[in-house]
Every structure is written in structure tokens, then in C-alpha cells.
Amino acid sequence: MTTSVRPYSASPEMVRRALEGKKISVVDLLVSTALLLALLSSLAVLLTLLIDVVSEGMPVLSTRLVDFVTSPLSARPESAGLVQGLMGSLVLVGFVIVVAFPLGVAAAIYLEEYAKDTPLNRLLVSNVRNLAGVPSIVYGLLGLAVFVKALSGVTNGRTLISGGLTLAVLVLPIIVITTSEALRAVPRGLREASFGVGATGWETIRHQVLPVSFPAILTGSVLAVARAFGESAPLLLAGAVLSNFFSAPAGTSFISQVAEQSYTALPIIIYNWARQPQEEFVALTAAGIVVLLVALLLVNAAAIIARDRFERKQVS
């Protein structure tokens, strides 16, 4: 009778403990404690803000939730709604996706797969990373100077086209950076194996690199689009107003409304309500913030579901 000996496999945690021994680092303990306190403090502040916003907006959400979401703008607090802001924000987000996503992915593919390691390209990458940290108000000034005034013959001035282009420029560096990181995470061996069977550079990128990196690209792009969904400062400078968007006379085409009429968005409506002196608008502002948060959560949830399905499809 023979007995099989189970091979011993040390986990990374066991190896770490063996290397560290029984020594207790005071610095590590202090740093981990400080980080834990910072995390708990951030969560406490976030929870406090959420509770405060929900409690202030509950009178509106509990009595006229459906009517509040589907009603148009109004100067009377008891009948004011968000439907035009939601529609304007969705159109802006669609505009951002159509413009920024393909440009950002294409730029990242060039920088990671085609561009050589030269001082000029390193400077270009550094500038892209710096642009990702520029405050949004600066992009608003850029949109006002370029899209609203300089290109008014193309955008018709303060229209949704100007706002969409401004938001697209705002999120473009973020999409480039996240896509570059996703492409860089693909193992080099996968590319070499593709080249070994005779595939060209573009065939390798299209059939091997992009499918593997697409879940990470999708996650980063959705986070960038979610930022655009909640921005208000660039839109204020790029022509967004508290207007009756999508309330044109009957027969007006969708393209005409987008290219010629003034527009609004959900953050703009919330900003204008917060400036009103009437007490009733306090509850409307809080309820609008809750609706905005729910919309952002739905967008992120949809992206997570799409990413998981794509990963399962890729594995199978």
C-alpha cells in the first residue's frame, strides 16, 4: 500500500510571514491605521452627504417621483420637472461617446503600438497625462473660445454641438490614458505569437490585443463618460441654459433641435435650482441630485454588466 504525499505549496502570505518573521513594524502599523482612518472618514462624509440629500429631497421623491422625472421645466416648484435635463444629458453623453471614444482609442493604439520611443512622443504622452488633470472650467473656456465663437459657423454658437464637443475634449485625455494602460497590460507574448503565425501588426491589434483589453477599455471609458454626465462648469461656458429643450414646435426635426436650439442638461438645472431663493427649490435641488446619482449608477451598472458579458463570451 502506497501513500501519496501531497506537495507542499506555500502561499504568498506564508512566504511574507516567513520573511518578516515576528517583527512588528511600528511605521507599517501607523501607516495602515492612518489609511484605514482616512477610508472610514471618507465613507462617513459620503454617507452623511447622501443621508442629508435624500432626506431633503424625500418630500418631492415620495409624493411626485414619476411626475418629477417626466415633467418639463417650470417656474412653479410644485410642477417643475427634469425630463428636459435628462434628455439633454443623454444626448450630450451620446455625442461624447461618438466623438471621444473612437478618437481616444485610436490615439492610444497609435501611442502604444505604432509610435516609437522618441523625445517628441514622450513629450506628447506627458502632455496628455497633464491634460487629464486640468480643471473642467479651463475646458469650458476652451469651448467658449473655440466651439462657441471661433467655429460658430459650424456649431451655430451656443448649441448642443458646442457643449458636446467641449465635453468630448474634456474626457478625451482620460480615455487615451485608460486605453493605453489597458493595451500595455496585454502580455507581450500574445503579440509575438500572433506575429509568429504570420499576422500583420493591424491584424494582431484587431484580433488579439483589442479583444483582450476591451473590458478594461470599456471600464475606463464609462468612468470618463460618467464624469462628463455630471459636469456643469464647462456647459455653463459652452452655452447651456435653463431652457425648454426638446419643446420646439411640432414638425421640428431632432437634428434641427440639436444644431440650432439652445439646450440644457441635468447638472445645469440642479445648479439653477440651487440659486433660487424660494424654500421649495431646496427640496427640488436635493431630489435632482438624487436622480443624477441614480442615473450615474445605472450607467456604471450597465457598463459593468456589458464588461462581464464580454469577458464570459471571450472565455467561452
Image (spheres, grey):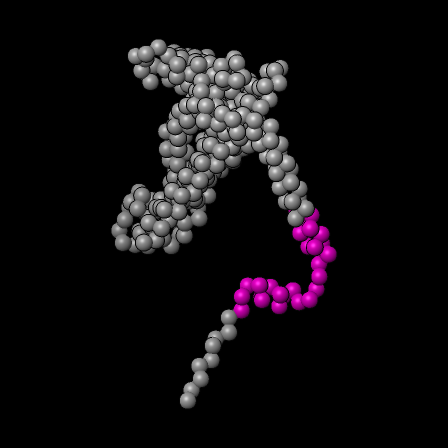
The quadrant the C terminus occupies is bottom left
Q: In the rendered view, would you say 257 is above or below 57?
A: above
Q: Is residue 259 visible?
A: no
On the image, the x and y values in percent for residue 254 come to: 33, 18
Left or right of residue 197, residue 37 in this image: right
Does the stretch in magenta take in 313? Answer: no
On the image, the x and y values in percent for residue 240 come to: 48, 17
Q: Residue furthest front?
A: 63
On the image, the x and y values in percent for residue 273 come to: 56, 19
30 vs 269, nearest the viewer: 269
Q: In the rendered view, would you say 143 is above or below 130?
A: above
For the point 52% across and 18% down, the residue is 78
The image quadrant that residue 98 belongs to is top left
Q: Residue furthest bottom?
A: 1
Q: Report the magenta stretch's main SS.
A: helix
On the image, the x and y values in percent for residue 217 come to: 42, 41
Stretch of the chain drawn in magenta: 10-35
Q: Residue furthest left?
A: 198
Does the stretch in magenta take in 24? Answer: yes
Count of numbered labels shown in the rendering: 0
For the point 44% across and 35% down, the residue is 299
96 vs 52, nearest the viewer: 52
For the point 29% across and 45% down, the residue is 203
The quadrant the N terminus occupies is bottom left
Q: Is residue 32 visible?
A: yes
The image quadrant that residue 182 belongs to is top left
For the point 41% across and 26% down, the residue is 90
